[in-house]
């Protein structure tokens, strides 16, 4: 199997502060990885580093065999849009929400490539199948929705893309158990084919049985990997 | 109250809203308080003047003094001013946005750079064209007509109608087109926009071009009543900035409402005593900002962040 993402001795952080310490991680095509760890131990930073939202200090990341960014990044956020266009789709922590756009326009924001823009109607209908409550809210402003609905919009926007790699940062953050279980069920029922997914999450129980590997992250280092066999 | 104040006030409101909306849009989408907007205004005024000199004899030779000639002249003036404004917007992009947009202290740095561009442009215009005021041809003609017993001058009606036309085209483009949605997404959440594959580096170009073109329109329209001079952009810049603040920076409907309010305030105060106009405007803005720190745009917001 070919690797979709290869992270090699990556150190990253914010300014002089180093959060991630020489992380090595690789991801196969079609693989689902759960990332667990305490608050402040680097889950979000890892996802932000992959998307170049955070500057790297050293190391390298290969996406689909291509080096992205070299040993140093080009400044926070500068290459994010380009990477997203290359096929990394993100649902960031706390939802990247545009309060003044309607649900439909918000989902359209996910269809940034030319091909995606042409077939945006079909894709939006697909998202409405995955998240039925959004259908009724199609024309209401995202700023008026509840937390759970916003999370659906945020993840729906992520799924609008034909990405090779999906990154989801704490999808259950701040949601009631009933709401997040239906949200997660929607995520698990997705047919990934050869697309991969990394989910950062606090609750290991929610991830087990659904992901191929669970990786613990502690103090900016990867600790303890639980593989396929043990989980099932 | 003298009813003829209404077209006068709407005329002011039209031009102010063009300036305020562009300043507001630049601020919220790329985080730059564009003090070079006055320079854009002046440059596009000069461009319109230059093109009117070139095209006036041609148009007069072919069409004489007909309505068609007037329309063509108006088209030449407004389009040349818009193109010049858009080109100047690109210049601002390369000088004040691209080199520094991901460096620390970007808002302050860009403020200083755009201020420098403003001052330098005024000096260059002075050097090139001299301090003498330039008059643009009157594209709407002279004269007045009456609606509901209110006398309206042609240039006032022309300004109001063309502003409404141009703003509605621009706002509906912003609402429905893909680029428009991208710009609005960037105005609302820059980080989320880059997660959606919207690059601020590429989206900043159309933003600065469109706002430059809007400054061009307002220059061509305002030059129907005042002359083009190197410093002709300063007052519109100050008015545009304060109205953008009054409307709540980044809020387009707020900026429009603010422009109408200030237009009427100036018209009414001006009819009583001309020298109190600026004074009363600023007092009004200060009072509004004390009670509504987010500007009047905050009242129109019905969503939460």
Image (cartoon, coloured by chain):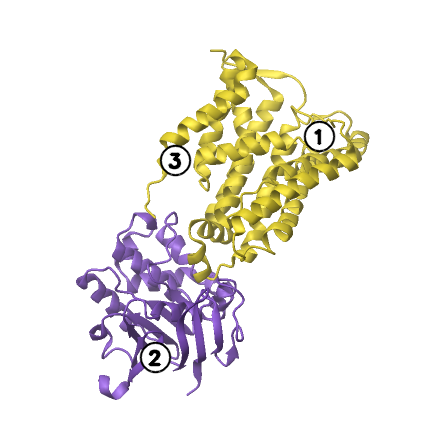
Mark 3 lies on residue: B293
Quadrant position of residue A217: bottom left
- The earlier-in-sequence mark between 3 and 1 is 1
Residue most toward the front?
A16
User: B49 or A59, which is in the foreground?
Assistant: A59
Q: From the top left corner, tell me how far across and down residue B6 is, in percent.
A: 50, 19
Q: Label for residue A222? A: 2
Nearer to us: label 1 or label 2? 2
Figure chain in purple: A
Q: Report whether mark 3 lies on the same chain as mark 2.
A: no
Element on which disc 2 rests = strand
Nearer to us: label 3 or label 1? 3
| Residue depicted at x 49% and y 78% | A60
Asked if residue A111 can be seen in this view, the reply is no
Q: Residues under labels 1 and 2: Cα distance?
A: 65 Å
Mark 1 lies on residue: B229
Tell me the shade of chain B. yellow
User: What is the chain identity of the residue bearing mark 2?
Assistant: A
Element on which disc 1 rests = loop
User: B240 or A71, which is in the foreground?
Assistant: A71
User: What is the chain identity of the residue bearing mark 1?
Assistant: B
**Crowding near the residue tagged with mark 3, few <14, some 14–19, many ≥20 C-alpha atoms within 10 Å:** some
């Amino acid at each position: 199997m070919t690797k979709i993402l290869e992270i090699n001795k990556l150190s990253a952080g914010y300014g002089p502060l180093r959060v991630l310490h020489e992380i090595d991680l690789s991801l196969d095509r079609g693989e689902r990885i759960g990332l667990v760890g305490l608050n402040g131990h680097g889950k979000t930073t890892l996802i932000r580093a992959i998307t170049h939202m955070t500057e790297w200090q050293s190391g390298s990341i290969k996406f689909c065999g291509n080096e992205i960014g070299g040993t140093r990044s080009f400044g926070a956020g500068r290459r994010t849009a380009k990477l997203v266009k290359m096929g990394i789709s993100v649902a960031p922590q706390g939802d990247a929400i545009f309060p003044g756009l309607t649900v439909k326009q918000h989902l359209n924001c996910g269809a940034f490539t030319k091909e995606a823009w042409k077939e945006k109607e079909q894709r939006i209908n697909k998202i409405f199948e995955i998240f039925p409550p959004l259908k009724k809210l199609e024309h209401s402003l995202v700023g008026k929705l509840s937390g759970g609905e916003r999370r659906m919009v945020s993840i729906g926007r992520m799924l609008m893309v034909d990405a090779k790699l999906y990154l989801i940062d704490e999808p259950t953050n701040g949601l009631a158990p009933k709401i997040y279980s239906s949200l997660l069920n929607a995520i698990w029922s997705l047919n990934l084919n050869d697309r991969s997914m990394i989910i950062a999450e606090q609750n290991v129980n929610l991830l087990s049985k659904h992901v191929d590997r669970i990786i613990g992250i502690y103090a900016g280092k990867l600790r303890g990997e639980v593989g396929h066999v043990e989980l099932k | 109250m003298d009813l003829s104040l209404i077209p006068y006030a709407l005329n002011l409101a039209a031009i102010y809203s063009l300036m305020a909306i562009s300043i507001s849009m630049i601020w919220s989408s790329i985080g730059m308080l564009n003090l070079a907007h006055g320079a854009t205004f002046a440059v596009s005024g000069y461009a319109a003047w230059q093109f009117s000199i070139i095209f006036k004899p041609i148009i007069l030779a072919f069409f004489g003094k007909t309505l068609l000639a007037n329309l063509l002249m108006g088209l030449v003036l407004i389009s040349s001013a818009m193109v010049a404004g858009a080109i100047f917007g690109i210049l601002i992009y390369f000088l004040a946005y691209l080199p520094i947009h991901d460096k620390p202290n970007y808002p302050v740095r860009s403020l200083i750079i755009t201020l420098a561009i403003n001052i330098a442009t005024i000096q260059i215009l002075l050097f090139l064209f001299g301090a003498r005021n330039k008059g643009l041809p009157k594209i709407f003609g002279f004269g007045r007509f009456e609606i509901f017993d209110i006398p309206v001058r042609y240039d006032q009606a022309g300004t109001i109608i063309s502003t409404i036309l141009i703003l509605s085209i621009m706002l509906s483009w912003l609402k429905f087109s893909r680029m428009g949605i991208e710009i609005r997404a960037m105005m609302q959440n820059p980080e989320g926009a880059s997660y959606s594959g919207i690059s601020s580096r590429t989206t900043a170009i159309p933003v600065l071009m469109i706002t430059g073109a809007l400054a061009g329109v307002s220059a061509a329209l305002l030059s129907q009543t005042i002359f083009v001079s190197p410093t002709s952009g300063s007052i519109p810049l100050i008015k545009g900035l304060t109205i953008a603040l009054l409307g709540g920076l980044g809020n387009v409907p707020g900026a429009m409402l603010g422009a109408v309010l200030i237009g009427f305030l100036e018209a009414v105060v001006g009819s009583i005593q001309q020298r109190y106009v600026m004074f009363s405007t600023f007092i009004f803005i200060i009072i509004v900002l004390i009670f509504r720190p987010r500007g009047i745009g905050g009242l129109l917001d019905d969503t939460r962040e």
